[in-house]
Amino acid sequence: MGHDVEQIVGPVDESAAVPVTAATVEHEDTGIKTILLVEDDESIGEVLVQAILQETSFMALLVSNGFEALRAVQAIRPHLFILDYHLPRMNGIELYDQLHTIPELANVPAIMISARLPRHELVRRDILGMNKPLDLDEFLQAIEDRIHS
């Protein structure tokens, strides 16, 4: 995976705040659930995407920072967010909060991954926290549980 978001969704005017609407995600409504994975370490992101694609029935889109994630949700409507906590320029909690201000994404569940997590912040937001290094079986089970809950 590891595609640049602009290759997937095209160039986006960063000054235009375009909310996700039914019209922008209708073409995505193929019945396959989508996971937005935000991980700045490309090698970790690639491994996680491959595990998701090979071991689940879900699609996964990998982006490397919060700003790319905010652009990506203009074109897709994820069913789950998997967010690294330590991201450049915007941490995972800040990104989660911004994503959840978009009405169509307000109820999308999240898993946050990192070597160190702010547990009190995760509990306040009902985010599942998983410590790196990840146990792949537990990670895949957590995805299934979050999407089907």
Image (cartoon, grey):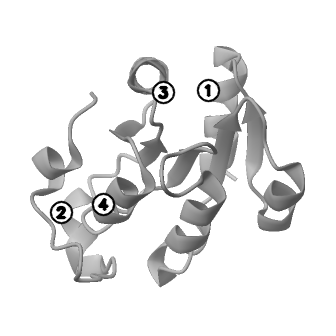
Determine whether the residue tagged by mark 4 lies in a helix, strand or loop.
loop
Local crowd size for mark 2, using a 10 Å CA cut-off: few (<14), some (14–19), many (≥20):
few
Check disc 4 and report the residue beneath it.
Answer: 76
**Marks 3/2: CA distance?**
22 Å
Residue located farthest toward the front when viewing the structure as drawn: 89
C-alpha separation, residue under disc 3 versus residue under disc 4: 19 Å
Q: Name the residue located 49 percent from the left edge and 83 percent from the top edge.
A: 103
Q: Amino acid at mark 3?
A: Thr
- Mark 2 = which residue? 27
Residue tagged 3: 56
**Real-space Cα separation, disc 3 to disc 1, in angstroms:** 8 Å
Q: Is residue 140 left or right of residue 131?
A: left
Mark 4 closeness class: few <14, some 14–19, many ≥20 residues within 10 Å? many
Between 18 and 107, the one lying in front of the other is 18
Which amino acid, by three-letter code, is at mark 2?
A: His
Provide residue 55's location: percent of width, then percent of height. 48, 19
Q: CA distance from mark 4 to mark 2?
A: 9 Å
Q: Earlier in the sequence, mark 3 or mark 1?
A: 3
From the viewer's side, name the closer residue of 87 and 145: 87
Q: Quadrant of residue 127?
A: bottom right
Q: Mark 1 and mark 3 in contact (Cβ < 8 Å)? A: yes
The quadrant of the rendering that contains the N terminus is top left
- Classify mark 1: residues with Cα within 10 Å, few (<14), some (14-19) or many (20+): some
4 or 103, nearer to the observer: 4
Q: Amino acid at mark 4?
A: Ile
Mark 3 or mark 2: which comes first in sequence?
2
**Amino acid type at image mark 1:** Leu
Question: Considering the numbered disc 3 on the image, is that residue within a helix, a strand or a loop?
Answer: loop
Are dots 3 and 2 in contact, CB under 8 Å?
no
Q: Which mark is residue 140?
A: 1
In space, the residues marked 4 and 1 are separated at their CA atoms by 22 Å
